Amino acid sequence: MDLATMYELSVPRDSLTEIDSSGVLGASFVSIDTSQSSGSSIENYGYLKSKPTKRPLSAEEALRAIRVLFELATERKAAGAASTDKVPVPDYKPRP
């Protein structure tokens, strides 16, 4: 991937990259994390290390999460809770 800017851009060579997305159906983009970087600037056509990728939810896990949200909304409606009330969220842990 090429990164071209109209201005001087200094990216430390020890920055980490990650492929991210703008939401569930959003576009994918490369995020460059410089928060823990202190190295010298990377040279033209240099390479950056990447963070480990996150495993996307399986269809089964997504449906399970939707079911939990639906059940919470149904319980909230039945209880007549105001939109500002706190509703406890059950523990949901996706499979490894």
Image (tube, helix red, strand yellow):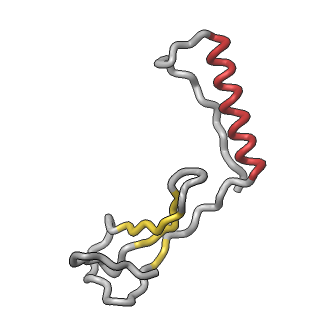
Residue 3 locus on image (x, y percent): 37, 78
Residue located at (33% from left, 89% from top): 44
List the single residue furthest toward the front. 6
List the single residue furthest toward the left. 8
Residue 69 locus on image (x, y percent): 66, 32
- Asked whether, in this view, residue 46 is left or right of residue 62, the answer is left
Where does the C terminus fall, quadrant-wise?
Answer: bottom right
Above or below, comparing residue 1 to residue 22 in the picture = below
- Asked whether, in this view, residue 54 is left or right of residue 96, the answer is left
List the single residue furthest toward the right. 60
Foreground pick, 17 / 14: 17
Residue 55 locus on image (x, y percent): 64, 61
Residue located at (67% from left, 18% from top): 75
- Asked whether, in this view, residue 1 is left or right of residue 81, the answer is left
Residue 82 locus on image (x, y percent): 52, 13
List the single residue furthest toward the top. 80
Residue located at (25% from left, 76% from top): 6
- Asked whether, in this view, residue 1 is left or right of residue 9, the answer is right
Counting labels gives: 0
Above or below, comparing residue 26 to residue 17 in the picture = above
